[in-house]
Image: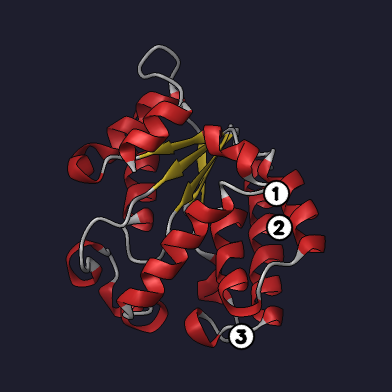
Amino acid sequence: MKLGLIGTHGVGKTTLAYDVCALLKKNGQNVELVTEVVRRSPLPHNEATTLEAQLWILHTQIASEIEAASRAPVVLCDRSVLDNYCYLVNKCGRQPALERWLEQWLETYGLLVGVPLVRESIYAEDFRQPALADTFRAPDRAFQQRIDALIKELLTEAPFERFAERVLWLDGIQQSQWAETVLGALEPGRAPKPTPENSRAAR
């Protein structure tokens, strides 16, 4: 099982990833966490990114997921190739040749969890490492909103629209319950599988 969190920067994906990992381990699961690879990139990021930088990120993301899957039967990624690709689209436009490759890789996620943009800023409040947030998180609200919109837009267009039904969109009002909601979706019988209906409702 591989789970990918999707969403723009600054919405709490990293915090949620650690919380879900803790719950899974508490339940006896052997889980491997793939953290944001952009933190290891030697190239520009955020608004200053380049095509080469985003290619590095996409390839490193996939390599990290492969490595994690070799170590544990459950892999949790605090980003997926889809939302990483949105930063490339924002800067350079869509890349049809890349999209065929990304479409195939998206098949490897058993569940995608959409983390919504719910309030003005959570940088100082929610991130476990706020000093790193100052370096890696773009504080521009408009940029944050553009990436959020791009993720949702791509999920309505070919070749990504068929993955929309695989996304469980979290409820922005019930943020304190996010980790339990994700855990329920991963454990049969605890919560319903994502559907287009609950995806639209959560957004």
User: What's under tag 2, amino acid-wise?
Assistant: Ala
CB under 8 Å between callouts 2 and 3? no
Q: Measuring from the top left, give residue 138's x and y in whole percent.
A: 38, 79
Residue 24 seen in render: no
Q: Is residue 37 above or below residue 183?
A: below
Left or right, 201 with reference to 158: left
Number of disc labels: 3
Residue identified by numbered label 3: 43
Viewer-proximal residue, 160 or 102? 160
Residue 7 seen in render: yes
- Disc 2 element: helix
User: What's under tag 1, amino acid-wise?
Assistant: Ile
> Residue 63 shows which numbered tag?
2
> Residue 66 shows which numbered tag?
1
**Residue at the outermost right position:** 97
The earlier-in-sequence mark between 1 and 3 is 3
Q: Measuring from the top left, give residue 202's x and y in whole percent.
A: 32, 38
CB under 8 Å between callouts 2 and 1? yes
Image quadrant assignment for residue 171: top left
Q: Is residue 200 above or below residue 188?
A: below
Task: Report the mark closest to the observer, 1 or 3.
Answer: 3
Q: Residue at x 38, y 57 (%)?
A: 14
